[in-house]
Image (spheres, coloured by chain):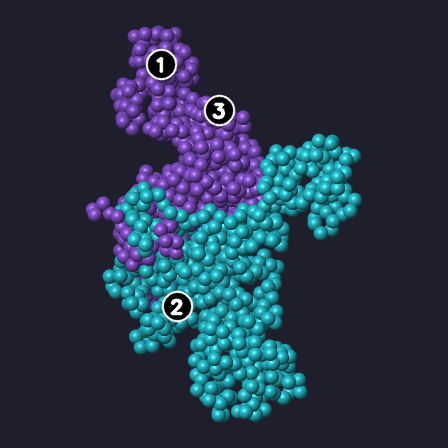
Chain colours: A cyan, B purple
Amino acid sequence: MYRTHNNGELRASNTGATVSLSGWVQKIRNKGFMVWVDLRDRYGITQLIFDEERTPKDMMEKASGLGREFVIQVTGTVIERESKNPTIPTGDIEILVSKLSVLNTSLTPPFTIEDATDGGEDLRMKYRYLDIRRKPVRENLIFRHKVTMAVRNFLSEKDFVEIETPYLIKSTPEGARDFVVPSRMNEGQFYALPQSPQTFKQLLMVGGMDKYFQIVKCFRDEDLRADRQPEFTQIDCEMAFIEQEDILNTFEGLTKHLLKEINGVEIGEFPRMTYDDAMATYGNDKPDIRFGMKFGELNAVAQHKDFGVFNNAQLVVGIAVPGGNSYTRKEIDTLIDWVKRPQVGALGMVYCRVNEDGTYKSSVDKFYNQEDLAKWAEATGAQKGDLICILSGDTHKVRTQLSALRMHLATQLGLRKSDEFAPLWVIDFPLLELDEETGHYHAMHHPFTAPKPGQLELLDTNPGDVKANAYDLVLNGNEIGGGSIRIHDKKTQAIMLKHLGFSDEEAKAQFGFLMDAFEYGAPPHGGIAFGLDRLVAILGGQETIRDFIAFPKNNAGRDVMIDAPAPLDKEQLTELHLKLDLQEN
Amino acid sequence: MYRTHNNGELRASNTGATVSLSGWVQKIRNKGFMVWVDLRDRYGITQLIFDEERTPKDMMEKASGLGREFVIQVTGTVIERESKNPTIPTGDIEILVSKLSVLNTSLTPPFTIEDATDGGEDLRMKYRYLDIRRKPVRENLIFRHKVTMAVRNFLSEKDFVEIETPYLIKSTPEGARDFVVPSRMNEGQFYALPQSPQTFKQLLMVGGMDKYFQIVKCFRDEDLRADRQPEFTQIDCEMAFIEQEDILNTFEGLTKHLLKEINGVEIGEFPRMTYDDAMATYGNDKPDIRFGMKFGELNAVAQHKDFGVFNNAQLVVGIAVPGGNSYTRKEIDTLIDWVKRPQVGALGMVYCRVNEDGTYKSSVDKFYNQEDLAKWAEATGAQKGDLICILSGDTHKVRTQLSALRMHLATQLGLRKSDEFAPLWVIDFPLLELDEETGHYHAMHHPFTAPKPGQLELLDTNPGDVKANAYDLVLNGNEIGGGSIRIHDKKTQAIMLKHLGFSDEEAKAQFGFLMDAFEYGAPPHGGIAFGLDRLVAILGGQETIRDFIAFPKNNAGRDVMIDAPAPLDKEQLTELHLKLDLQEN
């Protein structure tokens, strides 16, 4: 037996006990006549002591020879420490070692195994197994486990059944790119890895399983943006014989449960906001409502004067920055430069100070008097001491720009507190979304989302106006879940696919099995999927999903630790009936 | 709201209540003046009643027009049944319907949705979503969920952490064939899907995570035998700072817990048997010990006479078939034909009847007297009324043949009872296994398994004799789990890979990251993996894993429901830098 206790559990009450411990050497302090070793494992740190008076000479030497990250096993007696360390749970005791075995040595690690390491991102990823020894990474992985256990137990108790759906499925050109898997046994044919178990969970509803969930890996071969992974994990859920209200209540319940169990935070009923309202109020379909700075539309109060910029704009809209009147001219210029960066893309920014005496001072005083500006303050909710920032232009663009500014300012002002949680349902999403480049509409959620009852006819005349019973769960400015009520009859599904540009043949080839299934008594159904990586990061009060994934890939989709992907043997390619088609050839 | 109750929960105590139910039409009995409908959902069946006296005419007509598998919603009053049905939990009541909505119609299903369906395997797989509506399939999937929840909760409570390891990893030629995934972003390079998370779980041990598990999909591109799936699920586990004894105890605990929680069966300490003993006693490293028929080696008592067949054999070995003396000559001839089939491959079978009066009658009475035969009976444990079946030849082959006969007879005799559970640890597996074709040794478990302490040197001289701390958990004649203590130092791992025929370059290219990791303080560790599909089938008292998988593939690796795999668009191939290399070209 390698240990009787772990390194996090011994207390003063264990004094006198003979114990065995195993772990890694975190730190050695050698005073010659006395050697202290901090022994670390997953559960904590325990101090070992060797001293001239009580420790045999050969063991003193052995202890002196230990290095950082050596793996050792000790037996010894728990004794009370002379100088206690109140910062760790085992700080009242230390182990007077009577037996020391070195189980394995270690090279000097390429970065320090400390909470604040000196290792850069690349080095940490290459030696991820050492990074995981660091408490913050380790705790994140354990935290993730706690969240998934809480999810599974909550849903199980509510009669949901976790059902594994296949990973080797069929490629569909709709949506993002699939990762594909050549089939050796079926020459010239390929499986695809699922972007989500969408069609399978719908078939389970047709199969009568009525409450399904699965915590499942999904795959998207996208050009990776920062903090996206080619493989990611979803909490995938579907219910039959339900309406939107049932889904919202069930998964609001799950989210409340997690916030309470995991974060100890009790939250009342989640607010709900239509997509249209979210766009008008926050310029964003996943607004962070931990703070205010709601949009104030100013068309009515700003387009009656001679300021051409505003008069020619589709939308004039502002936000009141709390305490923003304290900004210097230079600070405001910095903000203006910020919104003019290509990533944001505004042409400029009008501002208006609300002085402590209630007067206004704007950058466009030439065109607007105090009375005009008072209306701006009213529309944006600006108080004395605030700064109103105003953008104008094309409605969609200007909302996106002002939303970016709002988030930027909130971060600057410290309003995005990681221990504060503000969930929100955004509902009534449009069914379709116009692709500006191609001029075609595509499904905003996915091709299986049902239009709102009675709106099917609108598809022909005003496709952009059709709304769906589609909903997102937003937490602290992140979409953590999204779903919809699905189509459950073949005719509607066929109409939908046609509007999305599928020919009858394409529809049949790709989704024929689903449309066939709809002919055999498909029940009304709908569902939701949560992005687990993101959910866990937010509950953990952090930003980066990579820190909650044991072995993440970098932005080029590479695992730098195992060095994957990698070339294949020629024989393997031949067996798979494939040849490389490299650009150099 | 589609329902106030499900179809399995209403009882006599609900009489008088107004309820709403939804589900599928299981059965309609139409007597003209009265219509009964069995309404089905996941939870059960509830009888609906429509009658001339109490039901409006238009609703009577609507009810008469319902077809099998129509999806309907009803509101009505719970009333006591006149003729109760004690075979279902809701059999005391029926619903007098006041409102009936058809939510969806159904074509006539291609097979009956009954416990014993008229649908063949192929049809059931093509319409798997209808097959899942059948109670046996549905209950199997729910059963699987219960098992995984029990596993997760048991291990979680014991401080195991479920950690997701990556699915897009690197191909290694060792072992079975990998499924591979071409990388679009890394031209000419491929990911592989994991055959198991073996190296990652070991790296988690190096990372200090000390108790890991994961219920995880694994992939093997093998030529499929019956009841194998290209994707399968593993309960993958690993522990650090442990010895074999710790692993056996922990996972014996898990298995006992499952047998108790899931099957209500309490089982004491699991027997343990060395691999050598299992081979000698049962001719098999996964013996079914629900019944006896242990091997009796007869070399000592059968090789002293003039029977050349036995005298020239490496091994003469028999089993006593309980009650087998009742077999007719014809039945025995059928057994002899059975062992001579090419799949078994014996050249013949000697037998000896043990008569009720204690005398013997063998097929080789010419060579052996009653005294000789009494010794055979003693060695095989044969009792009065038994039949001793004896095979002879090359030790390894004859054991395999007699093991096949033993299993065949046990099945015939009804000794393999699906509600009886006989677990067994088989331990001390050989480290290496000789590939008869190539004459090379390969790893019996995998290349990361540690030889038993002190046996490393034997690798050079007697590689076949080296034993490992490798163990299988066997249940009812199936290997449900297997694992080993791993190598945790670079030097031993290098020696091992060299013996398995890896050049230094190959070893470094494929496992360099693991061997590097061993240089930074790798702890002693080991683990085990359970085949979940098989485990669930056995606990469920069944043979076929496919019946416990929602969407299984057929023996050609195809999903006949979605028709995968399938050809890819040319554009997709081009993007992936690939060309087909078909045999026709």
* Relative horizontal placement of residue B508, taking residue A179 as reference (left or right): right
- Residue kind at label 3, given as amino acid type: Leu
What residue is pinned by disc 1?
Answer: B355
- Residue kind at label 1, given as amino acid type: Asn
- Provide residue A275's location: percent of width, then percent of height: 45, 73
- Residue kind at label 2, given as amino acid type: Met
Chain letter of disc 2 in the image: A
Q: Which mark is residue A444?
A: 2
- Provide residue B325's location: percent of width, then percent of height: 34, 18
Closer to viewer: mark 1 or mark 3: 3
- Provide residue A551's location: percent of width, then percent of height: 50, 50
Q: Residue at x 58, y 60 (%)?
A: A541
Alpha carbons under labels 2 and 3: distance apart: 65 Å
Alpha carbons under labels 1 and 2: distance apart: 81 Å
Chain letter of disc 1 in the image: B
What residue is pinned by disc 3?
Answer: B458
**Eyeballing the image, is A152 above or below B291?**
below
Q: Residue at x 60, y 81 (%)?
A: A329
Closer to viewer: mark 2 or mark 3: 3
- Provide residue B62's location: percent of width, then percent of height: 30, 64
Same chain shared by disc 1 and disc 3: yes
